[in-house]
């Protein structure tokens, strides 16, 4: 019999204990995923050259767009799953799982075909030069060939966590990371495959992790498991999944657009080395953002379940504790960037020019990073309580309303420094908007409690 007791304590158990029970595996998974990306840069920087790091940076928009489609399905389905389990609607939760697998497979295939056909002109548009294009192209050809594996793996892992198996989700992610860390040096240094070897290692590592997930979902003792009928697209289900997943989709799409603008700006005002410096800094910042996302993922099923059960006081307490934890992480990142940047950057490269440019940019990039926790947590919170419009709005304010205009204006006055400075300017403005939205939402919860 499926173990349906896993979710029953979410509306009664100790909140700090529940948050850390769900968040810790997610944090480990997110940290591992960041190390996954960092490892590629480190091995490529030391096993190939500085221009290869710049080439790898140019692939981020394509990878983010792919992640956007994957998260629109995966996050949308996992949110729906957690809410439906809170409402004791097991059948709909299982349908959401099956439909997510089908949708991820279709989207993954279509995206790969289109991206491979237009790969070279896309990379030039993203900011590639004649020197960096070969590295970016070589890497993405392999990544796109295995894109379906990536989509299904991430989608199943999101739903695994939402259905009450955070430790197993963590195990799958750690398996991918360890496999990648073993294969990266083997393929890059041992087989002399260069940047292509890093891409092959990435795809193979995700395939190994996917096998663990498939084994879980084929077991009838799992809370949610595969049945033939759940894979057929059910009327209304794609709309329900995509409407909830629209916020992370737009966030990733906009993030891709921002990275394109940033890369093109760096190429224009600083050249290929400036692009590489941003690539390193972005990977480092990504590590701390992903840890905050780990707390978010721990929060999501707790908030979704309690919101579905109308336990609004618990919803507020879960949010506040998550925000406190994320704030501690953002402060830690700020301290490292301001006081120990050289030691961190030297992990990626020995090139003195690249080190200098990255250190200078990193300090500016994270100048107001302690403020970032509020918009990051609040956006995910709105998503978890199925207020998609607010989640979308908050996700877009930082990168559309604030960051893009700053990127279009500041570099013309301050050059490369202006590109870097656009990021903290946007972070400060986004913090203000998030504060207004969450105060209003907390007042609404108070009214619910009084009625």
Image: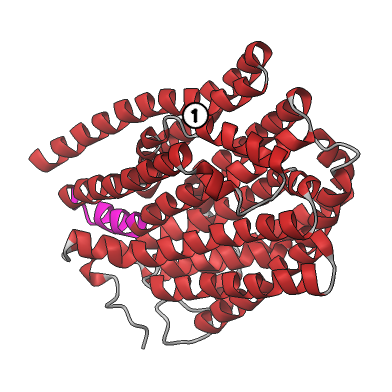
305 part of magenta stretch: yes
Of the 4 image quadrants, the one containing the C terminus is top left
Residue 406 position (above or below residue 28): above
Residue 106: image x %, image y %?
70, 60
Give the residue displayed 35% in from the left and 64% down from the top: 24
Numbered range of the magenta stretch: 299-312
Are there few (<14), some (14-19), or many (20+) residues within 10 Å of tag 1? many
Q: Which residue lies furthest to the right in this view?
A: 130
Structure colour scheme: secondary structure
Determine the residue positioned at 85% across, 69% down.
192
Residue 88 can be seen in this image? no
Considering the image in quadrants, where does the N terminus appear?
Answer: bottom left
Q: Mark 1 points at which residue?
A: 398
Q: Which of 382 and 324 is in front in this view?
A: 324
In the rendered image, residue 100, in percent from the top left (x then y), is placed at 56, 62
Q: Residue furthest top?
A: 413
């Amino acid at each position: 019999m499926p173990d349906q007791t896993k979710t029953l304590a979410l509306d009664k158990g100790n909140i700090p204990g529940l948050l850390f029970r769900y968040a810790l595996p997610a944090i480990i998974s997110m940290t591992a995923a960041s190390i996954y990306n960092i490892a590629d840069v480190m091995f490529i920087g030391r096993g190939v050259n500085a221009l290869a790091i710049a080439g790898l940076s140019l692939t981020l928009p394509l990878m983010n767009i792919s992640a956007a489609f994957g998260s629109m399905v995966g996050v949308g389905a996992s949110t729906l799953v957690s809410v439906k389990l809170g409402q004791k609607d097991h059948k709909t939760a299982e349908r959401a799982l099956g439909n997510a697998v089908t949708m991820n497979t279709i989207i993954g295939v279509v995206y790969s075909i289109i991206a491979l056909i237009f790969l070279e002109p896309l990379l030039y548009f993203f900011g590639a030069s004649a020197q960096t294009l070969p590295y970016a192209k070589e890497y993405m050809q392999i990544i796109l060939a295995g894109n379906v594996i990536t989509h299904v793996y991430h989608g199943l892992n999101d739903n695994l966590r939402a259905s009450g198996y955070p430790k197993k989700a963590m195990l799958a992610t750690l398996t991918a990371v360890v496999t990648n860390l073993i294969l990266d040096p083997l393929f890059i240094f041992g087989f002399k495959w260069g940047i292509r070897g890093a891409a092959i290692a990435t795809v193979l590592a995700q395939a190994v992790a996917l096998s663990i997930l498939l084994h879980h979902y084929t077991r009838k003792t799992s809370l949610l498991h595969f049945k033939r009928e759940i894979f057929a697209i059910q009327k209304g289900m794609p709309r329900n999944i995509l409407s909830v997943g629209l916020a992370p989709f737009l966030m990733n799409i906009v993030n891709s657009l921002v990275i394109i603008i940033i890369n093109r700006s760096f190429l224009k005002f600083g050249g290929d080395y400036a692009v590489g410096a941003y690539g390193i800094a972005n990977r480092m910042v990504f590590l701390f953002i992903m840890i905050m996302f780990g707390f978010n993922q721990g929060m999501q099923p707790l908030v979704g379940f309690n919101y579905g059960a109308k336990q609004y006081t618990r919803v507020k307490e879960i949010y506040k504790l998550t925000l406190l934890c994320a704030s501690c992480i953002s402060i830690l990142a700020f301290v490292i960037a301001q006081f120990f940047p050289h030691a961190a950057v030297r992990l990626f490269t020995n090139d003195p020019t690249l080190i200098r440019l990255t250190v200078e940019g990193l300090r500016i990039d994270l100048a107001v990073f302690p403020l970032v926790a509020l918009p990051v947590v609040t956006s995910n919170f709105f998503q978890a309580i199925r207020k998609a419009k607010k989640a979308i709005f908050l996700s877009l304010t930082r990168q559309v309303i604030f960051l893009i205009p700053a990127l279009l204006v500041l570099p013309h006055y301050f050059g490369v420094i202006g590109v870097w400075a656009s990021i903290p300017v946007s972070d400060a403005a986004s913090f203000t908007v998030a504060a207004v939205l969450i105060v209003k939402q907390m007042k609404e919860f108070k009214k619910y409690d009084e009625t």
